[in-house]
Image (tube, grey):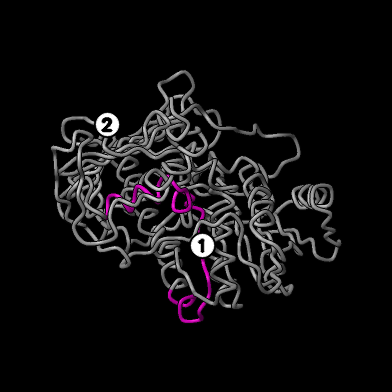
Amino acid sequence: MKKENKISRRSFLKNSALVGVLGTMGTGGAALLTSCGGKTEIKLQPLKEAGTYYLPDLMDIAKDGKELKAGVIGCGGRGSGAAFDFLSAGNGVTIVALADTFKDRVDGLADNLKKEKGIDIPENMRFVGLDAYKQVIDSGVDVVLIATPPVFRPIHFQYATEKNKHSFLEKPICVDPVGYRTIMVTSKQAQAKNLCVVTGTQRHHQRNYVESYKKIMDGTIGEITGGVVYWNQSMLWYKERQSGWSDCEWMIKDWVNWKWLSGDHIVEQHVHNIDVFTWFSGLKPLKATGFGSRQRRVTGDQYDNFSIDFEMENGVHLHSMSRQIDGCANNVSEFIQGTKGSWSTANNETVIKDLAGNVVWKFDAEAEKLNFKQTNPYVLEHVNLINHIRSNKPIDQASETAVSNMAAIMGRESAYTGAETTWEGMTASPLDYTPKDLNMGKMDMKTFVVPVPGKPLDNK
């Protein structure tokens, strides 16, 4: 081989990144797809013109700017993760206050921050209890990282916005229609105050999804005609009740298994996949009809599987499937069908195929690793938040996430009841999952029962 024809793997990946990572298949208007043989030419009609839709700036680290002090509300696994993700996202950012229902969670995160980052959280900036969120928000922070059990997130977001704080709001952002309406009202207030709100739907900050979105907006798969989304995996963690734990203490420590706290796993977890379809299609569901059941769950009052048919605004249907049972087939992915092809994230590959099944585009994960230092979407969502704050460019992801969140709520309630649910009916519903006797002591545990759909057998 002649010397001038030699191409190293590294230089090849750098060049391929222009297509695989940056997704430059057209800069707006109609684009052309040409086969390798140069004979097939397909004119693409964009669904949206480039420049008319939002794309995050997924840089490796946030741009420098004013110092930002953050407070963490919810110091469990996700809150602790969010704290370190925030600290990894830019220079000149720090954590100064912590809140959780339980002192051991607060102290645990404080110890890790001291050990890993040299950040010392004094005792007077460690707050404990159901109302501790107010103390963090009132402590002089610029940003709050809200990662409590989901039922509490609407009121925490509401108070943070009242106090003019920027928010990172972990998903899901509500578990019921009352929470949904709180989010929507608060979102408008945040916009009016020019605040920045980023949510934990991290696929919006994941390069393979962002590049896929651009391709689909370019018209690569044509008009969207349907889709299927999955989150099927093994059972999550649970905590059996220990001697001395009060009713509320047990449920909050075991929150991922109780529907009032988590919204059930279709809302708490599967919202990610539903969100991809509502994001890419720009549609919300008009109706949901579904079913589910409880087969293997050990604690709590939730289901462990759901199957939902969503009818979207334009008549297109989305099928949603989610399951948390050990020893079953697993699949966490999305599939969207269009008039000219399909897009899929199955088998750890992000690909677009034409109607004949030929791959016409594939995201190059190796090129991403070569060209970017930061590939963790959990960090990149904080990079985006910091950039918006420092650039004084407000962002509101809460109202967008609320659409997919409400879709998941519609599906859950259809499965619980056996009835068809509607967007109009559910968004106006008085349904409120927060217990009326919420306190850290004894609660009426008879109210926490596994839902049974349909009419009782003696009332046919």
CA gap, disc 2 and disc 1: 47 Å
Q: Quadrant of residue 290?
A: top left
Q: Amino acid at mark 1?
A: Val
Q: Quadrant of the N terminus?
A: top left
Considering depth in this image, is 3 or 204 the residue closer to the camera? 3
Work out whether residue 27 can be spotted. Answer: yes
Considering depth in this image, is 188 or 152 the residue closer to the camera? 188
**Residue at the image point whose x is 48% and y is 61% from the top:** 57
* Relative to 342, 304 lies left or right: right
Disc marking residue 312? none
Work out whether residue 452 can be spotted. Answer: no
Q: Is residue 221 above or below residue 241?
A: below
Considering the numbered disc 1 on the image, is that residue within a helix, a strand or a loop? Answer: strand
Residue assigned mark 1: 198
Secondary structure character of the magenta stretch overall? helix
**Residue at the image point whose x is 46% and y is 25% from the top:** 325
**First in sequence: mark 2 or mark 1?**
1
Label 2 crowding class (10 Å Cα cut-off): few <14, some 14-19, many 20+?
Answer: few
Q: Which residues are magenta?
A: 188-217
**Residue at the image point whose x is 57% and y is 72% from the top:** 389
- Looking at the image, is mark 2 or mark 1 nearer the viewer? 1
Residue assigned mark 2: 457
* Relative to 210, 79 lies left or right: right
Taking the magenta stretch, the answer to whether it contains residue 169 is: no
Q: Position of residue 302 (x, y in %)?
A: 46, 38
Label 1 crowding class (10 Å Cα cut-off): few <14, some 14-19, many 20+?
Answer: many
Considering the numbered disc 2 on the image, is that residue within a helix, a strand or a loop? Answer: helix
Q: Position of residue 14 (x, y in %)?
A: 48, 43
